[in-house]
Image (cartoon, rainbow, N blue to C red):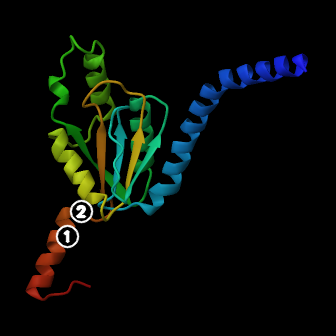
Amino acid sequence: MRRINVLATLLLIATASFTPACSAQAASTSWQSKLKQQLPLLGHRNWILIVDSAYPLQVSPGIETIETGTDQLAVTSAVLNAIDHSIHVAPDVYLDAELPFVPSQNFAKINSYREDLKKTLHGRSIQSLPHEQILGMISEAGKTYKVLVLKTNMAMPYTSVFLRLDCKYWGDKDEQTLRQAMKAGSSKR
């Protein structure tokens, strides 16, 4: 009986020591699979968020949160790469207006993060808005549209990257031209 207890204890210890690594690996492949599965279904007005570890769990019906267990910049790069290779959507990038003001004396790595983020987002148009305003936009969108939240292991404030998806093959100028033609009553065929 004592031998069984010892074996059970050793098995429990061994299982516990491997579980975090397995969970992190499962989380890593899980978010990538979910992104690959969801991206073809997403369109303009949907959002993909790559957020820090303290980002709140939102409860709007369209918001789905997935723990990635990995680096925020790596997730951001992977998501942007997937979107860039899609045929149907392009990202409008939003950052927290507070990010440039996070003090480096409180977060030693914030300056290098800001530089690395700038490199990751190179060549993209970026809009900066106050964090609460972005949260409001996302909460409102989540009432009607899908919002995919990818939570990372980032532990610095105001570092989230918010991607509002737009139609890749039909832009604002195209829409404006169409609306003007409709208003004028003409048809271009």
Viewport quadrant of the C terminus:
bottom left
| Residue at figure coordinates x 33%, y 37% from the top left | 55
Direction from residue 130 to residue 8 in the image, left or right = right
| Residue at figure coordinates x 18%, y 17% from the top left | 103
Residue 56 locus on image (x, y percent)? 32, 40
Residue 158 locus on image (x, y percent)? 24, 31
Q: Are marks 2 and 1 in contact (CB under 8 Å)?
A: yes
Direction from residue 32 to residue 56 in the image, left or right = left
Viewport quadrant of the N terminus:
top right
Residue 94 locus on image (x, y percent)? 23, 43
Task: In the rendered view, tell whether residue 172 sits above or below residue 182.
Answer: above
Closer-to-camera residue (24/79): 24
- The circle on residue 25 is none
Residue type, mark 2 in image: Gly
- Give the secondary structure at mark 1: helix
Task: In the rendered view, tell whether residue 11 sits above or below residue 96.
Answer: above
Task: In the rendered view, tell whether residue 151 sits above or below residue 62.
Answer: above
Residue 155 locus on image (x, y percent)? 35, 24
Residue type, mark 1 in image: Glu
Closer-to-camera residue (114/65): 65
- Give the secondary structure at mark 2: loop
Quarter of image, res 79: top left
Q: CA distance from mark 2 to mark 1?
A: 6 Å
* Farthest-out residue, bottom: 185
Structural crowding at the residue carrying mark 2, measured as other residues with C-alpha within 10 Å and reported as few (<14), some (14–19) or many (≥20): few
- The circle on residue 171 is 2
Structural crowding at the residue carrying mark 1, measured as other residues with C-alpha within 10 Å and reported as few (<14), some (14–19) or many (≥20): few
Direction from residue 186 to residue 60 in the image, left or right = right
Direction from residue 86 to residue 136 in the image, left or right = left
* Farthest-out residue, front: 1
- The circle on residue 175 is 1
